[in-house]
Image (cartoon, rainbow, N blue to C red):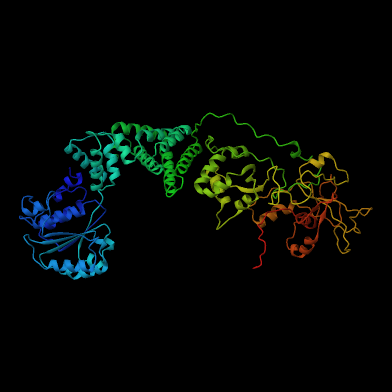
């Protein structure tokens, strides 16, 4: 039967204590000057020497040659309070966790009245003093405040704030701390020499790290490793027992991340999972290694003084890894790992969090221009072209678009290119240049912009990743979304912040320009249904539409619609001035005459323009339709004095008329709302505002 290592090497004098000079030196000075108090409070983390120091203080006070700061170790009191002693009658150790009531305090008070049996003082050591109830402390208060001359109190606790203030104010408080790694490493190395145990390089730093600065916990772990080894403690045994990641696996994933080798990175992650390691512990070990690399990169040759316990070979290998990473990339990678470590707390799928962390680190490397190596894959092919029936040729330059019932895109009237597949975020990004920012430059730098946006806001990044860069002219960036709700979310601003502002900040950081947006909803070719993404009305995108002059051609029927074509219908109310069959706009046969929107497209309007800017930008290009005039399809609108901006004040007056007007097409289809606004006011679409349906409560 062997005694535990921490008991065999328990200090017997203040000079043998390690890492607690802030406590031992004042106590030794007080003992030498015979200025010892009547009550002490020792506080600090578990296993840092509080109870051991209380016993040493008792030996110093009751030593036959004392009070002294160095016990003789030969008298009966010193022997009884030593490592192999059975305890002294005049030193009473009480476990306050189980003796914390008023009755226990009353019993202690009765025992304190009697003089010591043999020694100089009767000393009461209350361990776990924070467990004493307030009533028990109050019962001890008078005794602790004015004890007999032969009584000394030593309270030991890990939570001094739970000791009531009236007791704490009557004691000398000495805070204990965890032992620094350097002192602990030197101490356990000396113990291994005393025990004649061989230890592989790298084992003792793991033991010190696992002990967390507590001498008792560190010696317990070392004792466990020694007991389970045959004369020598191997590194593999220590790693397996303590649960840390093997150094070779850490080197493997660090080298793979430095080289941006995605295949090697995820192979290392699979090894972590297959060997049964805790992913959170692996991330913690990886963060520890990144910290070492940052220290090596910052200090160079002086890293040995900071990374104690690391061999020269380890330092050389870490210096090479730090050089491949670079200081800036090391710091950003450490930030990603720290965030992943926080997210893994309570996560239901730690492996998924680990793999996502590796993907972010690789994406960060791609954003900084480091090529990301990936497994070989078949060459990417262009997406299949849509069927011919879904492709509409562009309208001729000299002809206005024919009437169509295809879904209306609430955006600028310019023809919108087909949505592109979003660029991959891992694609290599060229360095920033001083050339003008064009559409090609914007698309080429888009992965870097997304990477910066991810660091600004994860929510905004998730929204923008589904957007396509359709156009960029001047300072207006056109983005297309496949879902109308994404467009609305992109436009939302709260306290001046939102996805659009986050993306603008990311573009400013990457390209150095400030952009405006034109967010457009482009439904997929097969989208339909009542969700709002399909047609607003009519017979569908394939319904033929006659030309304004009465003859529908195949080209005009299949052309893409960039403006609305509407036709007023005869009204029974003779007071109506628009569409009235008796008015000058009526044809000789009395049939409705088609009034077309002008074929000249208005300028693009950014969604984040102010209303004043929107009115100023659109008004000069808007024609003013005259009452009863017929705009010829081949004739551009006249540029005369009637081309004035639309007065928005007429909207309330025209609201009843707008609500009642219906533009009926020759083929029987109907258009509501926007077509009537265009016809009566000559207005154009500026922006889309969310609409909340009224409820029964208001």
Residue 639 percent across, percent down from the top left: 80, 50
Question: In the figure, 577 relative to 605: above or below?
Answer: below
* Left or right side of 159 for 419: right
Which picture quadrant has residue 480? top right
Residue 633 percent across, percent down from the top left: 84, 46
* Left or right side of 335 for 501: right
Q: How many marks?
A: 0
* Left or right side of 245 for 611: right
User: Can the viewer see residue 308 in this picture?
Assistant: no
Q: Nearer the viewer, residue 146 or 686?
A: 146
* Left or right side of 502 for 279: left
Quadrant position of the C terminus in the picture: bottom right
Residue 106 percent across, percent down from the top left: 18, 69
Q: Nearer the viewer, residue 253 or 228?
A: 228
| Residue in the image at 32% along x and 33% along y | 314
Residue 360 percent across, percent down from the top left: 48, 41
Which picture quadrant has residue 571? bottom right
Q: Nearer the viewer, residue 446 or 276?
A: 276
Looking at this rendering, what residue extends furthest in the right direction? 588
| Residue in the image at 17% along x and 67% along y | 107
User: Can the viewer see residue 425 in this picture?
Assistant: yes
Quadrant position of the N terminus in the picture: top left
């Amino acid at each position: 039967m062997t005694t535990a290592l921490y008991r065999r090497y328990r200090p017997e004098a203040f000079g043998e204590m390690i890492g607690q000079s802030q406590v031992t030196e004042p106590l030794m000075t007080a003992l030498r000057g015979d200025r010892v108090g009547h009550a002490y409070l020792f506080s600090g983390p578990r296993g840092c020497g509080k109870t051991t120091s209380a016993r040493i203080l008792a030996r110093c006070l009751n030593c036959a040659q004392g009070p002294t700061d160095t016990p003789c170790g030969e008298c009966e009191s010193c022997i009884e309070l030593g490592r192999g002693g059975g305890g002294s009658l005049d030193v009473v150790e009480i476990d306050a966790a189980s003796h914390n009531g008023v009755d226990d305090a009353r019993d202690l008070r009765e025992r304190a009245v009697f003089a010591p049996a043999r020694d100089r003082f009767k000393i009461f050591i209350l361990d776990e003093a924070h467990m004493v109830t307030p009533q028990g402390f109050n019962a001890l208060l008078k005794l602790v405040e004015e004890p007999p001359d032969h009584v000394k109190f030593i309270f030991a606790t890990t939570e001094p704030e739970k000791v009531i203030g009236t007791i704490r104010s009557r004691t000398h408080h000495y805070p204990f701390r965890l032992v620094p790694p350097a002192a602990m490493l030197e101490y356990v190395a000396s113990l291994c020499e005393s025990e004649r145990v061989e230890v592989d390089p790298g084992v003792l730093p793991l033991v010190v790290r696992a002990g967390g600065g507590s001498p008792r916990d560190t010696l317990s772990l070392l004792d466990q490793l020694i007991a389970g080894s045959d004369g020598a403690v191997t590194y593999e045994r220590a790693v397996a027992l303590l649960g840390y990641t093997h150094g070779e696996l850490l080197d493997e994933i660090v080298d793979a991340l430095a080289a941006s080798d995605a295949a090697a990175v995820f192979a290392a992650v699979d090894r972590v999972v297959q060997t049964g390691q805790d992913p959170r512990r692996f991330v913690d070990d990886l963060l520890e290694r990144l910290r070492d690399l940052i220290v090596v990169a910052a200090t160079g040759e002086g890293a040995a003084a900071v990374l104690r316990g690391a061999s020269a070979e380890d330092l050389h290998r870490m210096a090479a890894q730090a050089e491949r990473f670079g200081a800036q990339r090391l710091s950003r990678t450490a930030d990603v790992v720290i965030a992943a470590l926080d997210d893994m707390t309570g996560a239901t799928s730690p492996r998924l969090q680990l793999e996502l962390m590796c993907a972010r680190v690789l994406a960060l490397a791609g954003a900084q221009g480091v090529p990301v190596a990936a497994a070989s894959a078949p060459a990417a092919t262009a997406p299949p072209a849509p069927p011919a029936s879904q492709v509409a040729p562009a309208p001729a330059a000299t002809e206005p678009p024919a009437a169509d019932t295809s879904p209306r895109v609430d955006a600028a009237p310019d023809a919108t290119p087909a949505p592109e597949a979003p660029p991959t975020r891992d694609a290599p990004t060229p360095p920033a240049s001083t050339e003008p920012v064009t559409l090609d430059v914007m698309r080429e730098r888009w992965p870097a912009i997304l990477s910066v946006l991810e660091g600004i806001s994860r929510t905004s990044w998730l929204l923008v990743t589904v957007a396509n860069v359709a156009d960029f002219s001047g300072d207006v960036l056109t983005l297309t979304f496949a879902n109308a709700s994404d467009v609305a979310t992109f436009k939302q601003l709260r306290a001046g912040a939102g996805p659009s502002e986050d993306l603008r900040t990311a573009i400013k950081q990457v390209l150095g320009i400030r952009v405006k947006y034109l967010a457009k909803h482009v439904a997929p070719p097969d989208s339909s249904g009542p969700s709002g993404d399909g047609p607003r009305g009519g017979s569908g995108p394939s319904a033929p539409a006659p030309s304004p002059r009465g003859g529908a051609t195949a080209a005009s029927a299949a052309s893409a619609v960039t403006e609305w074509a509407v036709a007023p219908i005869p009204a029974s109310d003779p007071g109506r001035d628009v569409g009235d069959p008796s008015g000058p706009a009526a044809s000789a046969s009395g049939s409705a005459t088609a009034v077309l929107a002008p074929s000249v497209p208005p300028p693009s309007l950014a969604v984040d323009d102010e209303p004043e800017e929107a009115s100023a930008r659109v008004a000069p290009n808007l024609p003013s339709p005259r009452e009863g005039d017929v705009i010829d399809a081949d004739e551009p609108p006249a540029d005369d004095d009637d081309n004035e901006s639309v007065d928005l004040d007429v909207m309330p007056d025209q609201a009843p008329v707008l609500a009642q007007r219906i533009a009926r097409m020759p083929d029987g289809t109907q258009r509501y709302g926007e077509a009537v606004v265009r016809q009566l006011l000559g207005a154009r679409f500026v922006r889309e505002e969310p609409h909340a349906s009224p409820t029964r409560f208001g």
